Amino acid sequence: MPRIGKYWLSLELYYAPFDTAHTWAKVEPGGIVRVGVDDFAQKQAGELRFIRLFPPGREVKQKERFGTLETAKWVGPLISPLSGKISQVNDEVLKRPKLVNEDPYGRGWMVIIAPTNLEEDLTRLIKGDQAVEWLKKDIREVAKEVVP
């Protein structure tokens, strides 16, 4: 997992480059997709105090909200990287939002989605070198930080 500036990025995940979404998607065995926020998003947000997630059974659409993150001074949307039905919510992050700050690509995942249009939705996501360049751009433009 490379580090770009002070941010980690997994090259094995798909990322949603929609506005300031910064959510990731991991296709799991059986075709379900685990979703969370990337290291950039959690560091930009700061210490998470509260997370709201849509419940299992709720339909979500790519580029639309599936919940919210809250810090002491900020509330922001969680944007879904793909369309489908939420099949599972990570109850641990609801109880301990700081898990997202501590382990955004592991124990800090948010929801599992049963996708309805996986192949097409994946074409609008980015991965690997493309994700690295996208993150560098956001580090420069959003975080106003210098990166190589």
Image (cartoon, rainbow, N blue to C red):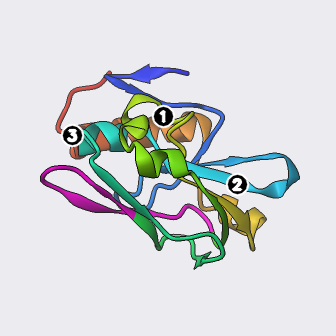
Element under disc 1: helix
Dividing the picture into quadrants, the one containing residue 77 is bottom left
Closer to the N terminus: mark 1 or mark 2? 2
Quadrant occupied by the C terminus: top left
Mark 1 = which residue?
Answer: 132
Mark 2 = which residue?
Answer: 33
Residue type at mark 1: give it.
Val
Residue at (61%, 65%) from the top-left corner? 82
Residue type at mark 2: give it.
Val
Task: Determine if residue 57 is in view.
Answer: yes
Instruction: Report whether 15 appears left or right of 71.
Output: right
Element under disc 3: loop
Residue 3 appears at what percent x and percent y? 43, 20
Residue 75: in magenta span: yes
Mark 3 = which residue?
Answer: 143
Quadrant occupied by the N terminus: top right
Q: Nearer the viewer, mark 1 or mark 2?
A: 2
